[in-house]
Structures are given as C-alpha cells and as structure tokens.
Amino acid sequence: MPDITPPTYANKVFGGYWQTATGTGNQYYSETGRGLQTWEDPSGGTIYAKWSSRKYKATFNANGGKFSDNTPSKEYYLDYGAVITTPSPDPTNDNGEPFISWNPPVPATMPPMDVTFAA
C-alpha cells in the first residue's frame, strides 16, 4: 500500500491502521503513515485507525526545597483529562518554612499541555 499522511485527532496519538477495530490483527500502516503490506481483499473492506491518549508532563518543583525522597522535583506523565494528584507529603525546605501552595494552582485534571507547578 502506498505511504500516507497520518491522520490527526486532538490530544490523541495515531498508532497506525489495523485489521480490527481493537487495533489487532494485520497492521496495514505504521504510526508514520508508511504502508506495511498489500491489501489482499479484492472485495474491499475496512481498516481501523488505532488511537491512544497523548501524555503530557506535570512537573512539581520544590522551588529550593526537597521532597521526602530528597529530590528537588517530581515529574508525572498523564493523559489529557486525567486527575492530577499532587505529590505527598508536600515538599519541605531547609529554612523550616511551611509549604503554602502550588503556583500556579493545580487544576483538577491534566490540561492538553506540559505544566510546571512551583512550591
């Protein structure tokens, strides 16, 4: 099959065209749109796009402090719309100042972009 321009779908990753709607069986096109094999059914038929959620990075920066494992930051890769859970326990700093909040405020769900939150 000739190469194609892969389709796009907001906040999803294209995983090729497949024989079944569940993304199994023969794969006819790769993620990049490269044709992988010849279509063998002269009567036609349907091939199915396989989609997965796009992951975005949420970084929590202790802003000069540290988390309980002595790291200065935490990174999580989440699907768009996934619930964001902040690291627990909250970071601490060497000055003994209490943690107040994350800046910017942490939304309930992951937006369609990488985000960084500072203590």
Image: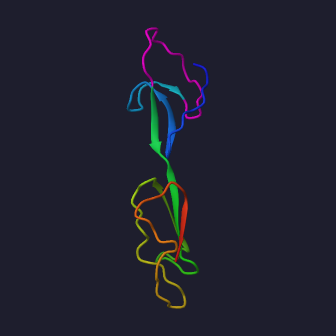
Say if 7 sits above or below 58 in the image: above
Give the image location of residue 77, x and y in percent: 49, 57
Residue situated in front as seen by the camera: 110 or 36 = 110
Give the image location of residue 96, x and y in percent: 50, 91
Say if 10 sits above or below 27 in the image: below
Q: Is residue 43 magenta?
A: yes
Outermost residue to the top? 42
Residue at 55% x, 31% y: name it: 30
Give the image location of residue 48, x and y in percent: 44, 28
The total number of labels drawn is 0
Judge left or right: residue 34 versus residue 11. Answer: right
Quarter of the image where one finds residue 5:
top right
Give the image location of residue 84, x and y in percent: 42, 63
Residue at 49% x, 28% y: name it: 17
Residue situated in front as seen by the camera: 32 or 80 = 80
Judge left or right: residue 110 versus residue 118. Answer: left
Most common secondary structure along the magenta stretch: loop
Quarter of the image where one finds residue 113:
bottom right
- For the N terminus, give its image quadrant: top right
How are the colours assigned in the image? rainbow
Q: Is residue 11 magenta?
A: no
Residue at 53% x, 59% y: name it: 57
Q: Which residues are magenta?
A: 30-47
Say if 32 sits above or below 65 in the image: above
